[in-house]
Amino acid sequence: MSIGAGKMGAVAIQHIGVSVLDLAKAREFYIDLLGAVEVGTPLQWRANPFIDAIVGLKDSAARQFMCRLGNAFIEVFEYSSPQPAPQDPDEGVNRYGYTHFAVQVEDVQACYERLLAAGIRVHAPPSVPGITVDADGTKHGYAATYCRDFFGNVFEIMEIYDHEQIHPVWRAGEGVITPV
């Protein structure tokens, strides 16, 4: 991939960071429930001037783990200093800033049912009629819904087939693919 004139040279999203109240509960969500794989050695720091400068916090202290879910990494932090403000588990997705991340799943209905059984709050049942099936069994379209992890962070589950607007990043029999 070449860098175009005037562009800063970004080539991909490497990871998404999320701050949580309880790192053990976050592992239960990301690793046990979503099926992410923990990678690397978890980090821990306290008042590290180098990290404080990067994250823009004074005298920060946190624990962290990184996990891979398909084609992306998720970095999960639990800060103990400075003390984070309480999180509103019902924060609207219309607020400014990052509002959610989306996870492509193989079977959105089965995923929805598993999430409900685990106590995950789901905004609405997935829009399964958004997927059509040709006479030869080829599927088209997508189905999705928004959910909230144990802390109230919003994520989306999506079952995606070839669609002009929403591109899959995984296909049965192929695994992770590069979307067009």
Image (cartoon, rainbow, N blue to C red):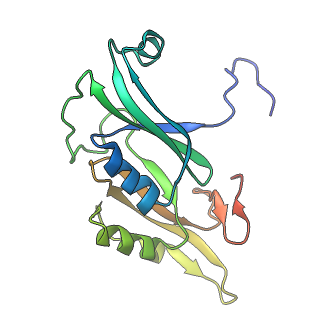
Question: Could you say which quadrant of the image residue 141 lies in?
Answer: bottom right
Q: Is residue 39 left or right of residue 123?
A: right
The percent position of residue 93, horizontal first and vertical second, equals: 31, 45
Which residue is at a point 46% across and 17% down the rendered structure image? 51
The answer to which image quadrant residue 3 occupies is top right
- Residue at 32%, 40% in the rendered image: 20
Left of 92 or right of it: where is 160?
right
Quarter of the image with the N terminus in it: top right
For residue 126, say whether it is visible: no
x then y, percent, for residue 89 = 22, 46
Residue 160 screen position, x and y as percent: 57, 65
| 144 is higher (above) or lower (below) than 12 | below
Give residue 140's position: percent from left, percent from top: 61, 73
Q: Nearer the viewer, residue 46 or 158?
A: 46
What residue do we see at 70% from left, 88% from top? 136
Farthest-out residue, right: 2
User: Where 98 sits versus 3, above or below?
Assistant: below
Q: Tag count in the figure? A: 0
Question: Is 9 in front, or is 106?
Answer: 106
Image side of residue 86 versus residue 80, left or right? left
Q: Is residue 159 left or right of residue 53?
A: right
Q: Height in image: 88 above or below 175?
A: above
Is residue 173 visible in this depiction of the protein?
A: yes
